[in-house]
Image: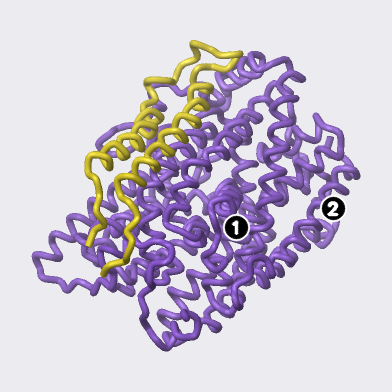
Chain colours: A purple, B yellow
């Protein structure tokens, strides 16, 4: 089990890790534009990625290492409402984003927007609303980056590294991994994760397919797997007097399952890292073509979720190096128990490399947001493109450094709590961004009021979810929904409050004659495509790159 | 100026996109064990099936939209 280092697994892990490091540095020359000294080049890969590169990039970006660790862990510990909702979530995600992401691409292409807050600034002429969107994006992204480190840590722990002895030996591998990631992201920008995503996705598909073909027969077949899961989930926990989890949702859990899926699907493409990957594509329809082929990853995610139940049938005991049970280790532990060392190493590499791609894109996206919507907007309005790129590169290092400190110094539970909050927060940017793609009826201050209402309600409600066993706060993402009277995803309730507040406030503000901001976009901008002319503006900054 | 678009076709595309969302959010239609398929409860295999159905619907909607809203030859302001 968890004694000693698994040498073959560690060697395979190190070799594959070195391979992606080389690729990461090499990426700065891949499909290179004239120079990297602009955010379009460094932060969006020159906006040149076609359908397949975008498929790998988005797949590597959205299906994060934390997802790969946490979804089966939730299935293992709590069952289908906590875990399997990820499947309908990542299915309905694509028809939903199909509708509005092409519009966001078009208007961003026309006006050179790099972030969602750029669009909000241009659409509503409001610095305040734009700042709110930017800060929400950064706050929601930071714990997400930290959780990618938790994914790497889970792998290192099962391999046998970390935990032992001095603080240096404990965290050195993680530190080295992150320093390398920071270095090649700094030099190659978005091109680095785009190249590494090929390796990541290939490894993930390989590992999951082998595991799903081999493991169930080893533990007695699928029927036995589901029977073992049903038995575990329906057993009453003596401490709480309730069943351990949910095998198949009963009528009381329908709202929870559906709102988790819908709320998560609406939220995902509001995250800066999703928007960055979308805007880096070459044409308006790239994202739509991707909406038809990205579900391949959802299929794999569903199989991976089921591995959490395979682990129940296999009797996997996820025990951390500290000797305590830790459900997050269940997938790495299942692989170590079931496969020869070298193949376990491939699986661990898939998770660890799977952490690098989203961590890189998230840090780039957060850095772009800081640069465009805080630095240039509030600190140095006449920053040149080269300056923007430089600030962004440095901020991407700071963001990763912060995530590392966060994970090494604070309890992991904090990162998980903030990630839960981040999901609630990021959905509160939806009205300003997506409603704004279709209508300018909403008043900028009305949207700001709605945003504030949704943030406050969501944060307080999430804090008040108490774990019945430990009494701790932030014990889940479900609470009683007003009006409906059922348990549902807090983010979606907050979103409804947000939208209603924004509409009511808009009506009041218009009656009171509150001034509206200037809209720099025109209707045609929302349908622009590759090759259409771009809007020339802010000549001092644009002239250096748009030729 | 909006690009020229074919309204009935856009409505068809909207329906194609809405069907998977409604189907998967309607838990009452599939949250049960029977009929199982190769040991998989209905709840599980039905959702896997929708991965493919949804990809098909989205692809169909894409083809319809390409026809409904053809790319303009020239960009107009």
Residue A325: x and y, percent?
71, 36
Residue A337: x and y, percent?
81, 31
Instruction: Tell me, yes or no, if residue A312 can be seen here.
Output: yes
- Which residue in the protein does label 2 denote? A15
Kind of element beneath mark 1: helix
In the rendered image, residues at marks 2 and 1 fall on the same chain: yes
Residue at image x 44%, y 66%?
A115
Considering only vertical position in the picture, is A250 above or below A117?
above
Give the left or right position of residue B40, taking residue B19 as reference.
Answer: right
Residue B50: x and y, percent?
47, 28
- Image quadrant in which the N terminus of chain A is located: top right
Q: Is B29 or A511 nearer to us in this picture?
A: B29
Residue B60 found in image quarter: top left
Residue at image x 50%, y 42%?
A475
Residue at image x 58%, y 50%?
A52
Q: Which residue lies furthest to the left in this view?
A: A511
Q: Mark 1 lies on which chain?
A: A
Q: Is A292 or A152 nearer to us in this picture?
A: A292
Q: Mark 2 lies on which chain?
A: A
Kind of element beneath mark 2: helix
Residue A502: x and y, percent?
23, 57
Residue A25 marker: none
- CA gap, disc 2 to disc 1? 24 Å
Considering only vertical position in the picture, is A54 above or below A390?
above
Residue A392 found in image quarter: bottom right
- Which residue in the protein does label 1 denote? A145
Q: Residue furthest front?
A: B73
Instruction: Tell me, yes or no, if residue A452 can be seen here.
Output: no
């Amino acid at each position: 089990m968890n004694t000693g280092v698994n040498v073959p697994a560690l060697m395979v892990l190190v070799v594959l890790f070195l391979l992606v490091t080389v690729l990461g540095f090499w990426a700065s020359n891949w499909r290179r534009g004239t120079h990297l000294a602009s955010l379009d080049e460094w932060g969006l890969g020159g906006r040149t990625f076609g359908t397949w590169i975008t498929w790998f990039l988005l797949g590597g970006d959205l299906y994060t290492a934390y997802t790969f660790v946490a979804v089966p862990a939730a299935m293992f510990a709590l069952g289908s409402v906590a875990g399997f909702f990820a499947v309908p979530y990542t299915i309905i995600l694509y028809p939903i984003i199909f509708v509005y992401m092409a519009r966001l691409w078009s208007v961003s292409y026309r006006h050179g927007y790099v972030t969602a807050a750029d669009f909000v600034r241009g659409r509503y002429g409001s610095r305040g609303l734009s700042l709110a969107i930017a800060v929400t994006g950064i706050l929601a992204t930071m714990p997400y980056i930290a959780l990618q480190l938790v994914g790497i840590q889970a792998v290192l722990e099962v391999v046998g590294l970390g935990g032992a002895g001095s603080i240096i030996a404990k965290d050195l591998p993680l530190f080295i991994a992150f320093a390398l990631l920071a270095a090649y992201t700094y030099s190659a920008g978005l091109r680095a994760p785009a190249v590494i995503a090929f390796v990541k996705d290939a490894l993930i598909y390989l590992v999951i397919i082998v595991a799903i073909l081999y493991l169930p027969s080893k533990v007695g077949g699928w029927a036995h797997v589901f029977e073992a899961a049903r038995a575990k989930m329906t057993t009453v926990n003596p401490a709480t007097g309730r069943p351990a989890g949910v095998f198949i949702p009963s009528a009381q859990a329908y709202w929870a399952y559906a709102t988790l899926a819908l709320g998560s699907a609406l939220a995902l493409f509001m995250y800066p890292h999703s928007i960055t990957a979308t805007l880096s594509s070459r044409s308006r329809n790239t994202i739509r073509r991707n909406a038809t082929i990205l579900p391949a990853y959802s299929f794999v995610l569903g199989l991976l979720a089921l591995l959490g139940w395979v682990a129940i049938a296999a009797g996997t005991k996820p025990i951390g190096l500290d000797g305590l049970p830790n459900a997050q280790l269940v997938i790495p532990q299942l692989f170590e128990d079931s496969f020869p060392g070298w193949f376990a190493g491939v699986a661990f590499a898939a998770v660890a490399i799977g952490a690098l791609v989203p961590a890189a894109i998230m840090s780039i996206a957060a850095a772009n947001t800081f640069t465009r919507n805080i630095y240039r907007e509030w600190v140095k309005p006449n920053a040149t493109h080269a300056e923007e790129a430089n600030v962004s590169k440095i901020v991407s290092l700071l963001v990763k450094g912060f995530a590392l400190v966060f994970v090494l110094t604070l309890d992991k539970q904090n990162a998980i709590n903030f990630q839960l909050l981040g999901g609630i927060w990021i959905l509160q940017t939806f009205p300003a961004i997506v409603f704004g793609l279709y209508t300018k009826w909403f008043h900028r201050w009305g949207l700001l009021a709605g945003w504030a209402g949704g943030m406050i309600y969501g944060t307080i409600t999430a804090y008040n979810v108490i774990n019945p066993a430990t009494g701790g706060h932030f014990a889940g993402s479900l609470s009683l929904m007003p009006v409906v009277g059922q348990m549902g995803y807090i983010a979606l309730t907050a979103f409804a409050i947000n939208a209603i507040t924004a509409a009511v406030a808009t009506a009041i503000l218009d009656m009171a004659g509150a001034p509206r901001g200037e809209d720099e976009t025109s209707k045609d901008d929302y349908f622009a495509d590759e090759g259409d002319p771009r809007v020339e503006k802010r000549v001092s900054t644009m002239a250096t790159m748009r030729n | 100026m909006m690009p020229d678009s074919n309204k009935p076709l856009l409505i068809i595309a909207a329906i194609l996109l809405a069907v998977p969302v409604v189907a998967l959010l309607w838990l009452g239609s599939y949250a049960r064990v029977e009929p199982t398929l190769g040991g998989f409860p209905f709840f599980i295999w039905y959702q896997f099936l929708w991965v493919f159905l949804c990809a098909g619907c989205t692809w169909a909607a894409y083809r319809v939209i390409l026809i409904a809203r053809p790319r303009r030859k020239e960009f107009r302001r």
